[in-house]
Image (cartoon, helix red, strand yellow):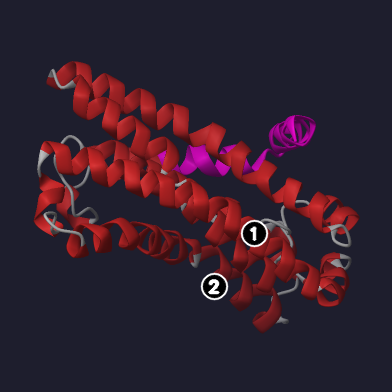
Amino acid sequence: MVATVRSEWVRAWRWPAQVPMTVLGNAALVCVAWFVIPRSWLFDFTGAWGFPIALAGWMYADVSATNVLGQDPADALSVLSDGAALERLLRAKTIVLWLMVAPACAAVALALGVAEHDLTLAALMMVGLCVIPLGPLALSGWVGVVFPYHQRSLRWRWANRRRFRSVVARWLILVVLPYGVFPAAIVVVLAVPLLMFHLLPPFDVGAVLTADGRVGFVLSASVVSVLAWFAAIRGTAFLAGRRAGRLTDYLGDAERG
């Protein structure tokens, strides 16, 4: 597993380094949206602690999380018939993306905790930012198994614009889709601990707002997310195996866009 992660890390930074460039681009966008324009236009949580949450959400919610097979079709094709190897590759991809996002967001939360003199909340925020996204990342990968696409240049897509439906429209939808899929996956993961707070006395949803409630919520959500990470990646690999024929045809032909 370590070797697979190392290989995927090196590949991710190889020019044109699309995954890290996408992550950095989204980080820049959220900084502009947070500090330049009115925050209420784009964010629900506009207080200081909302920034690391927004930063993590925007950095994760992109095609890097969904187009897991189309990022490197050659690697995907080489393991498509081997469920265990495919599972390792999918785990490595989520770990690499996590390594690019989680430490930076945790550092922001720590700096905020120092500035706000609340290291307890900072520690809780760091745990949440580092662990809770794992499950949603794995769930988002299902999109890339059902609807993969090749990472072709804008020049190529413009040159092939007459094939509008398959080359342009489909691609545009799949580029925008992660901004809805990842938040939806977050809701799925968080729904479980919220339901627990609602059903198990003496807790209720309002208890999440207390100090002890926040700790219980983050820890339970983290456990659910880790379990979802293992289960969802295994499910993604299984689904890819069931669709191996279609995926082989599509991933093996970059002209399909």
Observer able to see residue 58: no
Looking at the rendered image, the disc whose residue lies closer to the viewer, 2 or 1, is 1
Mark 1 neighbour class, 10 Å CA radius: few under 14, some 14 to 19, many 20 or more: many
Q: Secondary structure at mark 1?
A: loop
Q: Which of these two is toward me, 221 or 248?
A: 221
Identify which residue is drawn at 11% across, 50% down.
207
Q: Secondary structure at mark 2?
A: helix
**Prevailing secondary structure class for the magenta stretch in the rendered image:** helix
Residue furthest front as drawn: 201
Q: Badge 1 is on which residue? A: 67
Q: Badge 2 is on which residue? A: 173
Quadrant of the drawing holding the N terminus? top right
Q: Report the number of discs.
A: 2
> In the rendering, at what x and y percent does residue 31 appear?
32, 38
What amino acid type should be assigned to the residue bearing mark 1?
A: Asn
> In the rendering, at what x and y percent does residue 238 appear?
73, 66
User: Is 173 placed above or below 43 here?
Assistant: below
Q: Which of these two is toward me, 233 or 69?
A: 233
Q: Which residues are magenta?
A: 1-27
User: Is 14 placed above or below 240 here?
Assistant: above
Mark 2 neighbour class, 10 Å CA radius: few under 14, some 14 to 19, many 20 or more: few
Identify which residue is drawn at 14% across, 54% down.
203
Observer able to see residue 120: yes
Residue 18 sits inside the magenta stretch:
yes
> In the rendering, at what x and y percent does residue 169 appear?
60, 77
Residue 136 sits inside the magenta stretch:
no
